[in-house]
Amino acid sequence: MSEKPPLDSANSEPVEFFDEGQLVGVWTTQPLGRMLDYKAPEGGCWLGAFVEVPLGPRKVLGVVWSAGRGDFDYAKVRKVVRVLDAAPMRGELREFLEKAGAYTLTDMESMLRLGVRAPGLVDPPSMRKVYRKGDVEPDRMTVPRGRVLDALQEYGDLSFTLKELSEAAGVTSSVVKGLVKQGAVREEDTPRDLPYPRLDPSLPSKELAADQAEAAEILKAGIRSGAYGTTLLRGVTGSGKTEVYLEAVAECLRKGRQALVLLPEIALTAEFLTRVQARFGAKPAEWHSGVTMTERRRAWKMVGQGGAQLIVGARSALFLPFRDLGLVVVDEEHDTSYKQEDGVLYNARDMTVLRASICSAQVVLASATPSLESWANAEAGKYRRIDLTSRFGDAVMPDMRAIDMRGVKLPGNRWISPQLKGEVEARVASGEQALLFINRRGYAPVTICRACGHQIGCDHCDARMVEHRFQKRLVCHQCGETKAMPEICPSCEAEDRLAAVGPGVERLAEEAAELFPDARIATLSSDMYGSARALKAEIVGIAEGAADIIIGTQLVAKGHNFPLLTLVGVIDADLGLQGSDLRAAERTFQLMRQVAGRAGRSSKKGTALMQTYQPEHPVIRAILAGDENGFWSAEAGERRMASVPPYGRLAGIILSSPDPQEVFELGGELARLDGPLRAIGAQVFGPAPAPIARVRGRHRVRLLVKAEKSAPIQRAIAAWLRQVRVPPQVRLSVDIDPQSFY
């Protein structure tokens, strides 16, 4: 080890260097439960270096985490194979992974996998061939050639390797090579990873209203402080929250630090990237499943090297190896998609606050309908709060009214009331757009036999299969299993007796096509498009006026701006109020307010109509009255009385196995051995079958731990679980702060 560790120029962090042969402790991505000692390779390596190490007969990826323990015969210690071509993992990211793992009770190997999700990271640096769309049309168009050109068109200016392009188009590489010869596809030599174009924060921004300018100045002052802080930016839909936090991004770039904007839905990125390009003169780096593996590897490496100033991404972008992270924006911070529900169970909103506190960055939580957790933190003074109460420019908030469905007579296969039908017809006749919203994917939620009453369920889950008529298949929304729509009942074998029960978005679109035969209808549902890019293109087309009526699921509530949209009709406003989820009222309120906010975002005033059978329900009344503070105060009071989040702690324990007896026996044993939980005043409820008791052939049992807010719940749960031996077939997951209870 060098006598004086050199300093990292980004923030003067001491960095250790290990000379050849010195012992280094390496965490690998393999489930071993401990660090392994290796000898530093020829030329040595830095602390945090990404390395390839031998493990048995294999070579695996790892990170140099510390000095080696030295509790092993030095002569038997193997040497690091090589140091990878990537900037070393910085101390703040290593600390973040450790603390996030401790909070979520996740093993270090799983946390590390989140931090090394770079495709091709172990590949040696070299030149490679990449493929882009050319300027020449092929002399002869075939179906395979068309698929190649469609794939290139769909991904815009992103580059592909030959393998990526062939797989995306579903063709052989010879088809791509043939198009290269004709000039329809360009083949280029490109260095493996190039920095992104520089963003210019000095370019003029949109003219901000007084309250927006004041909000932007508060956020910029936080950036200039160079310290940690979290701000809840609460603004009604269309109030210009994006323009305000883009000014914070500009200030961050002026300071030479990196910024990250998290979005809840990939489909939101197209419009947002356009706004970023207009503000800063270039597009940022993207990190989500809608970009190619080539581009994801480039983004990962450039983030670590400082070659990417602004990253726009999904929740996993929080684990990128930033060189100097100064700002994280969590847009639509209330959105449930920020909670990772499989693998490592974490909430990106909460982990953002943790990471920012470690690297002295600012956090902006932006939403028109913030989560109760963020609202409570702002009320308690933990977060700064900024309110934007008016819409941007000439736009005003929509009128909101209820349609009492109790007095409406509709045929059994109809869901659009006459009043809503008349309003839609008036908007279409005026050249405006109407949105009909239902929060159910597919054609119908249940398929039932009218002869014997059998409901078609999934073979692998305790869930009903949902008819997707455009696919001509039944789909399980739990495990993804699909099967062809049967012609006879699988129970009684009666023919032509299967019937769809209830509406889904496809069935609503079918009804709309009959009621409005001359209207152009677009259906927006995440499972109706083959790729994120195709969905983005559809949204752009709608914003430009390519549809008169939009039929949509929850997807349409998330931040889209349709200037011509002046009417929103909610088909079943009561749907989310059913069930026992402690967040049911909160989520219904958020969703209804968000979807209503799509109306009237331009100069024409909008209207939102909610079809409901419960117009007196407190949530429905709060939505119509627009009394957000009243709703949050009442909801907070109920949660406080029950000592549930955000005024108490919950943790879910999920056990699953192919053998139901095995999981119930383990659950029962845990319930009996609850001493470590009782020691901190916590209670354990269960075991009980999960609401969906079988998923992918595995039987699921849940236990729920409830504790006071200040109780050390992680430490107690860890001690509790150490008392039992988990059988090989059983999977045990711990969900700290669960968002769903399925």
Image (tube, grey):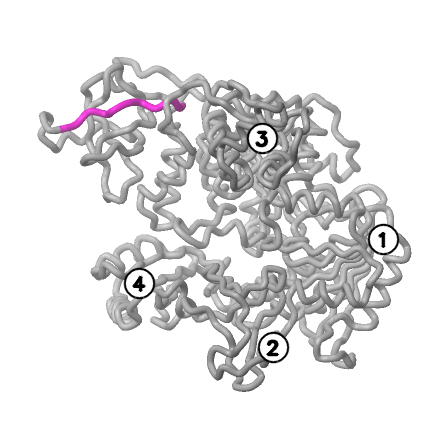
Look at label 2 and name its amino acid.
Ala
Residue 406 visible in the snapshot: yes
The part of the chain drawn in magenta is: 77-86
Q: Position of residue 683 (x, y in %)?
A: 35, 67
Q: Quickly name the residue at label 2.
A: 499
Between residue 145 and residue 608, name the one nearer to us. Answer: 145
Residue in the image at 23% along x and 34% along y? 58
Quadrant that contains the N terminus: top left
Residue in the image at 54% along x and 37% along y? 291
**Label 4 CA crowd tier, 10 Å (few <14, some 14–19, many 20+):** many
Look at label 4 and name its amino acid.
Leu
Location of residue 410 by image quarter? bottom right
Q: Quickly name the residue at label 4.
A: 677
Compared to residue 676, the image places residue 501 above or below, namely below
Q: Do the numbered discs 3 and 1 sit on residues whose CB atoms are within 8 Å?
A: no
Q: Looking at the image, is mark 2 or mark 4 nearer the viewer?
A: 2
Compared to residue 43, the image places residue 360 above or below, namely below
Compared to residue 123, the image places residue 6 above or below, namely above
Q: Quickly name the residue at label 3.
A: 158
Q: Do the numbered discs 2 and 1 sit on residues whose CB atoms are within 8 Å?
A: no
Please tell me which of labels 1 and 4 falls first in the chain.
1
